[in-house]
Amino acid sequence: MNSREYRQRRHRRRAAWIEANGNRKHPDTEAESLIEFASKWAPFGGASEEEILVHFGMPLRRFIERLWQVIPESKCGQDEIRILASVYPHPAESTTEHHWT
């Protein structure tokens, strides 16, 4: 392989990598996995605690906290974020303080 062929091959590989990663919802693969998993289960009311534990090794509460940590940096659209919020409520919104008088 001469230098010209090498440059062309390298250019094609880089272009393919950019195209593949340009469609990702998040630059971090763990975050991408969390978002894809949550989105996949959203139409069914969300994943079970067991399913989350098996796939990510964390309890439901930690999964939801981590999901909402990565969503602001993601390329998720507003519709997808609304759906995720309805199924996996943001931890700050799901806890309410009761003021007893």
Image (spheres, helix red, strand yellow):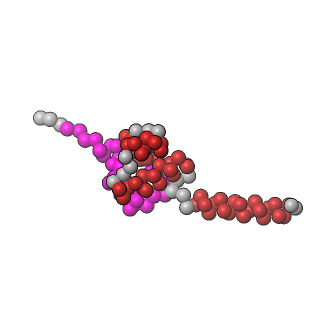
Residue 17, image quadrant: bottom right
Residue located at (43% from left, 61% from top): 77
Q: Nearer the viewer, residue 22 or 33?
A: 33
Residue 82 forms part of the magenta stretch: yes
Q: Residue furthest left?
A: 101
Could you tell me residue 71's position as x and y percent? Answer: 44, 51
Relative to 4, does residue 34 appear above or below in the rendering? above
Range covered by the magenta-colored residues: 71-98
Considering depth in this image, is 12 or 52 the residue closer to the camera? 52
Asked whether residue 65 is in view, the answer is no
Q: Is residue 90 left or right of residue 8?
A: left
Which residue is pictured at 51% across the width and 56% down the height?
25
The extreme right residue here reads 2
93 over 3 or under it: above or below: above
Residue 68 lies, in percent from the top left, at 41, 47
Residue sitting at 55 percent across and 49 percent down? 29
Residue 21 left/right relative to 71: right
Residue 50 visible, this orientation: yes
1 versus 46 height, above or below: below
